[in-house]
Image (tube, coloured by chain):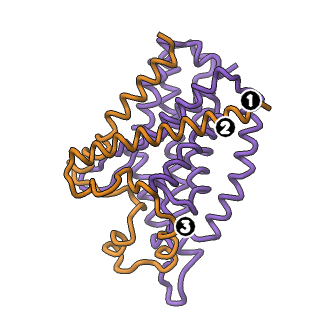
Amino acid sequence: MKITTKLWIGIVMLIVLSPLGLLLPKHFKAGVAWGEWSSDELYKLIGYVPKGLEKLSSLWRAPIPEYVFGDCKERGLAQLSLAYIVSAGLGIVVVILLVWFIGRMLIKK
Amino acid sequence: MHIPDGYLGPVTCGFFYAIMLPIELAASKMVKKTLKAKQVPILAIGAAFSFVIMMFNLPIPGGSTGHAVGGVLVAILLGPWAACIAITVALVVQALLFGDGGITALGANCFNMAFILPFTGYYIYRIAGYRAETGSVRKIFAAGAAGYIGMNLAALLTGIEFGLQPLLHHTATGQALYCPYGLNITLPTMLGEHLLIFGWVEAIVTALVIKYLLKISPELLEEAHR
């Protein structure tokens, strides 16, 4: 088997396992990464939302915030995990297309 | 380590965009010189790996979470310039599509994770693994040390960027406008988390994968260092 094929299989395995990145923190009752709180979470921490932060934080609305789309958030861990896998797969397809595009531009002179 | 929108003020955001632009241009020039058509799939695998490994959030029980970046591994495999491009692609997709890391903070996030982390890691690997035999313990150790130090340097910079905000921007009454925590909190937190936990995660990921690759495909690693 070609080495690249082996590595792609590894990537697919990581995609399938990606919900671990969601389930483990939930299990151990860990919150978000330090410094990555939403405005609400920050309000709970310091009692106010910094004015500039409030303005900038609503600047961009990502289509799939936090790798979970639609109303999967209210539907339990199984759906949440599935959303995570789909997001990982989708993200990687976009990443591959971008790299392919960059590669073409750079190599073609 | 993905700084969201709103935590860095305009000065910091602009500063890092201004720094990253020439770095990305230099990276594409360097890659243009060295990249062969058959290496594009490896570049894509590197970017995909970095993208997906960052989804593996690991918990500090009852506290916060963090994750490996995979960037040092990509740098060892592809060289630091190509790694810079691969990780940038991953960070751009994470920010635009998934809101993981801010748009305004993208320059800073790229500086920390797509520039400092792979470059530090790459050169530490080269120095610590200098003339070590393929597959030797020292070579694997060099990969682990590269992951650990690269990760912690990126965390240190993130801490500095966060912590400078209250000094740079505040209201007349002293209320913060962006990140509310100063260096006295951001530095120990970011460094502590990464020195104790997430640095080791990057070290283990880097060392294990390098060990595996040296075993099944040593030519892949030699190619990157020619």
User: In this orientation, which residue lies closer to the viewer: B122 or B45?
Assistant: B45
**In the rendered image, which residue does mark 2 sit on?**
A102
Q: CA distance from mark 3 to mark 2?
A: 29 Å
Q: Is residue B99 above or below residue B216?
A: below
Residue B83 figure quarter: top right
User: In this orientation, which residue lies closer to the viewer: A19 or B156?
Assistant: A19
* Residue B116 makes an appearance in the image: yes
Task: Label the orange chain with its letter.
Answer: A
| Secondary structure found at label 2 | helix
Q: Looking at numbered disc 2 in the image, what kind of residue is underneath it?
A: Ile
User: In this orientation, which residue lies closer to the viewer: B110 or B184?
Assistant: B110
Callout 1: few (<14), some (14-19), or many (20+) C-alpha neighbours within 10 Å? some
Callout 2: few (<14), some (14-19), or many (20+) C-alpha neighbours within 10 Å? some
Q: Is residue B189 left or right of residue B162?
A: left
| Secondary structure found at label 3 | loop
**In the rendered image, which residue does mark 1 sit on?**
A107
Q: Looking at numbered disc 1 in the image, what kind of residue is underneath it?
A: Ile
| Chain that bears disc 1 | A
Q: Looking at numbered disc 3 in the image, what kind of residue is underneath it?
A: Leu
Q: CA distance from mark 2 to mark 1?
A: 8 Å
| Chain that bears disc 2 | A
**In the rendered image, which residue does mark 3 sit on?**
B8
Q: Are marks 2 and 1 on the same chain?
A: yes
| Secondary structure found at label 1 | helix
What residue is drawn where x is 46% and y is 78%?
Answer: A50
Q: Which quadrant is home to the C terminus of chain B?
A: top right
Looking at the rendered image, the disc whose residue lies closer to the viewer, 1 or 3, is 1
Residue B28 figure quarter: top right
Are the residues flagged by discs 2 and 1 in contact, CB closer than 8 Å?
no
Q: CA distance from mark 1 to mark 3?
A: 36 Å
